[in-house]
Image (cartoon, helix red, strand yellow):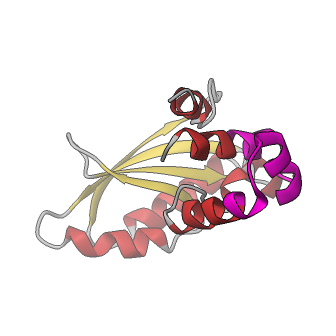
């Protein structure tokens, strides 16, 4: 990613509905240049799914929890596919430390979270879970400051 790529992503962040022609004019580049770079950025994974921008709260899942999952050391690798199948699991990270995975989960309420935790524990390779509930999102996921740095070259 170079400075122009970062500037393109910042312009899209400012106005996701802008046309290619508008963006090209705003950035001072040819529309074909913009189109080629957007294609490359999408293919390279720099531009993710639009669904990532959807707030789960508007889908009735405003409770956020982080669940650490300890897996069986002999068969635990199979668990990730089963855990991915749980719709309320919105992120999954392999981690170091006491647990093997850290899941970000969304739920309707604490009863729903209890059900989800039970679903996770039903996966045979899951040995133990530990749950913490997010009280308030102090800062949402962001990469804009990194893009701003990259745009400066």
3 relative to 59, above or below: above
Quarter of image, res 70:
bottom left
122 relative to 65, above or below: below
68 horizontally vs 8: left or right:
left
24 horizontally vs 22: left or right:
left
Could you tell me what secondary structure mostly forms the magenta stretch?
A: helix
Near-viewer residue (56 or 149): 149
- Name the spot of residue 74 as percent of width and height, x first: 11, 70
104 horizontally vs 9: left or right:
left
Near-viewer residue (7 or 50): 7
Does the magenta portion include 80?
no
- Name the spot of residue 103 as percent of width and height, x first: 44, 51
**What residue range appears in magenta?**
10-34
- The residue drawn where x is 65% and y is 39% is 7
- Name the spot of residue 31 as percent of width and height, x first: 78, 59
37 relative to 9, above or below: below
- The residue drawn where x is 63% and y is 33% is 140
- Name the spot of residue 81 as percent of width and height, x first: 38, 75
77 horizontally vs 51: left or right:
left
Does the magenta portion include 17?
yes
Q: Is residue 88 visible?
A: no
Name the outermost residue toward the left: 74
Q: Is residue 60 visible?
A: yes
Name the outermost residue toward the top: 138
* Figure disc tally: 0
- The residue drawn where x is 58% and y is 32% is 151
């Amino acid at each position: 990613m170079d400075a122009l790529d970062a500037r393109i992503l910042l312009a899209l962040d400012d106005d996701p509905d802008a046309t290619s022609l508008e963006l090209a004019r705003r950035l001072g580049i040819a529309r074909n240049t913009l189109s080629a770079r957007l294609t490359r950025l999408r293919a390279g994974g720099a531009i993710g799914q639009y669904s990532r921008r959807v707030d789960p709260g508007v889908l009735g899942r405003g409770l956020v929890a982080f669940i650490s999952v300890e897996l069986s050391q002999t068969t635990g690798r199979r668990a990730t596919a089963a855990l991915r199948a749980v719709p309320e699991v919105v992120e999954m990270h392999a981690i170091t430390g006491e647990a093997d995975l850290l899941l970000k989960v969304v739920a309707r309420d604490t009863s729903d979270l209890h059900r989800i935790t039970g679903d996770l524990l039903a996966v045979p390779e899951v040995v133990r879970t530990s749950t913490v509930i997010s009280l308030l999102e102090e800062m949402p996921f962001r990469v804009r400051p990194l893009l701003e740095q990259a745009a400066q070259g």
